Image (cartoon, rainbow, N blue to C red):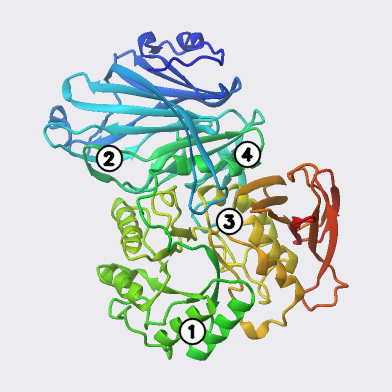
Amino acid sequence: MKKFTGHIFSLLFLFFNLNTSAQIIPETTHKLVSPDNNIVVNFFQKKLSDSTRSLHYSVDYKGKSVIAESDLDVQLDNHLCEQAMALPVDHHVKWCENLKVIGSETNSNNSVWKPLIGEQSEIKDNYNSLIIHLVKDDNPIYKMDLEIRAYNEGAAIRYYFPENEKGTYYRIMSENTTFTMPGNTKAWVANWAQAPYKLLPLKDWVQESERPLTLQLGNGLFACLTEARMVDYARTKFKLSPDKPNTILTSMYTPADLISPFSTPWRVIMVGEKIGDLVENNHLILNLNPPSLIKDESWIKPGKIIRVMTQTTQDAKDNIDFAAKHGMQYILFDWKWYGPAFTFTSDVTKVVAPLDMPEIVRYGKEKGIGVWLYVNLQGLYSQSDSLFAVYHKWGIKGVKFGFVQIGSHRWTTWVEEMIKKAAENQIMVNIHDDWRPTGEQRTYPNLMTAEGIRGNEEMPDATHNTVLPFTRFIAGGADYTICYYTKRIKTTHAHQLALAAIYYSPIQTLYWYDKPAMSKDEPELSFWDKIPTTWDETKIVDGTPGEFVTTARRNGKDWFVGTITNNSARNLNLSFSFLPKGKNYTATIYSDDDNATTQTKVVIETKVVNSATLLTIKLKASGGQAIYLTPADK
């Protein structure tokens, strides 16, 4: 057992409650402090006037409230508890009512692990934990543990149901964990995973909001609410409490049917003094998932991918040639290569497009280019027992899952099983449409990326693009499907170039609506030619959602910097303080310029910079700038 010291915080305020109908039970109070003493999580029980007892918590950061007194509760259907059998059929048991605290334990962890792919080469997993052991007053076989972790980056809470001696099944109807925020809090709300974002006061919500949910607190802090390890449960979003001001409620998609022992997903509360802290610390979600279960990871290779727009053997070879010339690693055959996608009658192990797949795979291997295949849900669902083995035999490197079903407990476990089956056959995965990761890419790093984003398939404007780094990308890699030549884009070309540095995706789709024939080998393509898709270090240099963002990422000794602005032009001072002191770098700068000689209006210049350099950049409306930095003295 470890006694936590450091942050001086009093629980006395808990005992003086203005609501005389609900009193703190002093002997149930516990305090958990993060390793750096900045975050404090308080746990306590309250007794109502009718003697009903309920569970609550709060979170503070450096003495400022992040989560005020909030509820901890899961709701189960009435077949669980014997004493509920006499209740009406539609009655649901509040599991967290009338629990007795029978013990607690504390622990800590301070370790470092190295992800195979990621936004940094090493991840620190440092936390203090508290487990509260609880049991039902009137039936000792019904037990529950509440597990709380305090990290320097935030806090996480989950419910654990140990093995029940009678083998009882559990149907969780809803999870009523709440988050009461400071007054004047605003949130970047998106009603579904591919929706646009709106910055709204909490009172102005009208529907559920996606997770991660990024919040600007009224006291100057920033927070993010999300879930981690959502692999055997129903997806949750967030909605407003109907009866408690400034309070966000966990909203389950459907019930979850479970057998003990089991844990619910983690409810995660990330905290930052700057909004960029949330992005740089998104490894917290990975830390709440188990280590990799793939013993041999040598076949998992990140890279850049181009879609074959016209599915013929010659077009495939043209794309392979283009990919090899421009430092890419993969080509993708999108839907219909095996026939109609929205039917169970198409055989996803047979090629019906005019493609000589063995020859294409052979030619790609000769050029160092691998092949990915798109498969819609109908094919994945009906042929999942065999298709990954067939694709491995063909020499296919990855599968893009299309139009997966999301939300329910059933489809959650199905998607996770597909990731696992793909791994067993050395197949990488990209999941498209409304699905978002919750850190399971640590456990199965063959999960390379996912959509769950309003990207270039919808052609959002520049303002939307500046919001994404601070919202969707907190969940991990996202396949935005970046474009360059198509006239559909609503931004400048330097803006699109910069997205490859700003948006993290281990499988980074480039030239989504483009064809090799459109290219004139413009010199600015060298930025994409050089850029990798996995990183040793990531820094949010500056930015405000909806206005602009600058991201710097390092791979080896080289840095790649991307800056984009919203629909308005602006001037920015770019600091290179993220560079190591005392070293000079050659900066190749790609900027928008109407006077440039290329058809894409990008001008290239080089400068020598160091950590003391302050560069003034002028951004056009919906514009951007990309910079490649390499040591000047190699």
Q: Residue 43, located in which quarter of the rendered image?
A: top left
Q: Earlier in the sequence, mark 1 or mark 3?
A: 1
Are dots 2 and 3 in contact, CB under 8 Å? Answer: no
Q: CA distance from mark 2 to mark 1?
A: 52 Å
The residue that mark 1 highlights is 363
Tell me the amino acid under the disc marked 4.
Asp
Quadrant where the C terminus lies? Answer: bottom right
- Point out residue 371 in the picture as x, y percentages from the top left corner: 46, 75
Q: Nearer the viewer, mark 2 or mark 4?
A: 4
Q: Earlier in the sequence, mark 2 or mark 3?
A: 2
Q: Earlier in the sequence, mark 3 or mark 4?
A: 4
- Point out residue 467 in the picture as x, y percentages from the top left corner: 64, 51
Residue 409 visible (yes or no): yes
Q: Earlier in the sequence, mark 2 or mark 1?
A: 2
Within 10 Å of disc 2 (Cα), the crowding (few <14, some 14-19, many 20+) is: many
Q: CA distance from mark 3 to mark 4?
A: 16 Å
The kind of secondary structure element at disc 3 is loop
Q: Earlier in the sequence, mark 2 or mark 4?
A: 2
As drawn, the label of residue 277 is 4
The residue that mark 2 highlights is 172
Q: Earlier in the sequence, mark 4 or mark 1?
A: 4
